[in-house]
């Protein structure tokens, strides 16, 4: 879970002179499963609910994403909680499979 401050283009539009809006953002680097969780959390964010709405500005590739600096503080905690739940489910699934195999072996 790497965080780096970066500058990114928010919008580019042309008039007689080239104008570029620049917005401060955070560059996040993570593995692919964590990126899927991050995208899921972002998709569930509702605009105007005090949570700041969606915070992903642009996904650069499978492991890098630019996020608004106004990203909710609890996003990292929500990702870690989801990973813990997935790990607990995997452990429970492995235990259940082992119990089934033992039961089948005894028959």
Image (tube, rainbow, N blue to C red):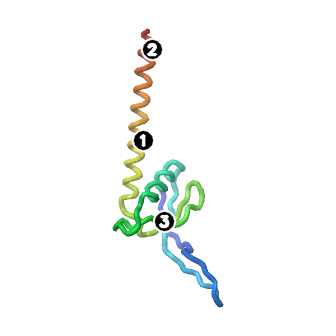
Q: Position of residue 26 (x, y in %)?
A: 48, 66
Question: Badge 1 local density, few (<14 within 10 Å), some, or many (20+)?
Answer: few
Looking at the image, do the residues carrying marks 1 and 3 touch, with CB atoms under 8 Å apart? Answer: no
Residue placed most toward the observer, 27 or 78: 78
Q: Of marks 1 and 2, which one's residue comes earlier in the chain?
A: 1
Identify the residue shown where x is 43% and y is 20%. Answer: 100
Question: Badge 2 local density, few (<14 within 10 Å), some, or many (20+)?
Answer: few
Which of the 4 image quarters holds residue 106? top left
Q: Of marks 2 and 3, which one's residue comes earlier in the chain?
A: 3
Looking at the image, do the residues carrying marks 1 and 2 touch, with CB atoms under 8 Å apart? Answer: no
Residue 86 is marked as 1
Point out the residue furthest to the bottom here. Answer: 16
Identify the residue shown where x is 41% and y is 52%. Answer: 79
Secondary structure of the residue carrying tag 1 is helix
Q: Position of residue 103 (x, y in %)?
A: 41, 15
Q: Of marks 1 and 3, which one's residue comes earlier in the chain?
A: 3
Looking at the picture, does residue 21 appear above or below residue 57?
below
Residue that label 3 marks: 67
Find the distance from the CA under tag 2 to the CA under tag 3. Answer: 50 Å
Point out the residue furthest to the left here. Answer: 50
Question: Badge 3 local density, few (<14 within 10 Å), some, or many (20+)?
Answer: many
Residue 43 is marked as none
Instruction: Assign the C terminus to one quadrant of the image.
Output: top left
Residue that label 2 marks: 104
Which of the 4 image quarters holds residue 61? bottom right
Looking at the picture, does residue 69 appear above or below residue 62?
below
Q: Position of residue 21 (x, y in %)?
A: 54, 80
Secondary structure of the residue carrying tag 2 is helix
């Amino acid at each position: 879970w790497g965080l780096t401050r970066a500058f990114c283009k928010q919008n580019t539009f042309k008039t007689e002179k080239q104008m570029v809006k620049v917005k401060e953002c955070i560059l996040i680097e993570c593995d692919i499963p964590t990126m899927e969780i991050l995208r899921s959390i972002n998709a569930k964010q509702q605009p105007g609910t005090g949570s700041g709405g969606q915070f992903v500005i642009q996904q650069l590739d499978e492991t890098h994403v630019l996020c608004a600096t106004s990203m909710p503080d609890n996003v990292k905690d929500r990702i870690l909680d989801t990973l813990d739940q997935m790990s607990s489910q995997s452990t429970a699934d492995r235990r259940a499979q082992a119990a089934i195999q033992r039961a089948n072996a005894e028959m």
